[in-house]
Amino acid sequence: MGMPSDLKETAIKFLQLAASGNVDKAYELVAPSFRHHNPYFPGDAASLKAGMQENAHKNPDKILDVQRAISEDSFVAVHSRVQMPSNTLTIAVVHIFRFEHNKIVELWDIGQPQPEQMANAFGMF
């Protein structure tokens, strides 16, 4: 397995490519056995890839800003701010990746829209 910093770089590269619409290039980083846990799509790579391509088409102005990345063993967690200026939506997203042989084999994602008014003075990021 690669070094933790290499895995972090790969996870971030995957997210940046997918967010910018280069979904095919992003999927070069996943293993043939890739599976995911997004509840809105079947668990296979093809369905999530199609969903990512559709999202990129609908939101060509999407901005993914990585806030922090944490790596431990074969896992990487990436906390990001995702902005979609066309609909003024900002979302806090955490992606958790599992790697085998330097390829992404499993992915979890959790997102929370940023409310207009927040009680928390520290914010979401």
Image: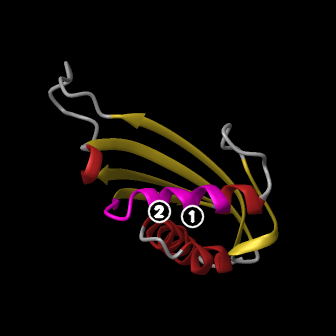
* Secondary structure state at the residue bearing disc 2: helix
Rendered view: 52 above or below 108: below
Which quadrant is home to the C terminus?
top left
Q: Nearer the viewer, residue 88 or 79?
A: 88
Residue under label 1, please give it: 53
Q: Position of residue 89 (x, y in %)?
A: 30, 42
Quarter of the image holding residue 27?
A: bottom right
Pick whichever, 75 or 15, lies toward us. 15
In the rendered image, residue 56 lying in the magenta stretch gets the answer yes
Q: Amino acid at mark 2?
A: Ala
Going by the image, does 81 lie left or right of 3? left
The number of discs equals 2
- The residue at 47%/62% (across/down) is 56
Choose between 106 and 90: the one closer to the eye: 90
Q: What span is in magenta? A: 50-63
Q: Do the CB atoms of the residues marked 1 and 2 lie less than 8 Å apart?
A: yes
Residue sitting at x 14%, y 27%: 121
Name the residue beneath numbered marker 2.
56
Query: Hey, what amino acid is under mark 1?
Result: Gln
Q: Is residue 106 magenta?
A: no
Q: CA distance from mark 1 to mark 2?
A: 5 Å
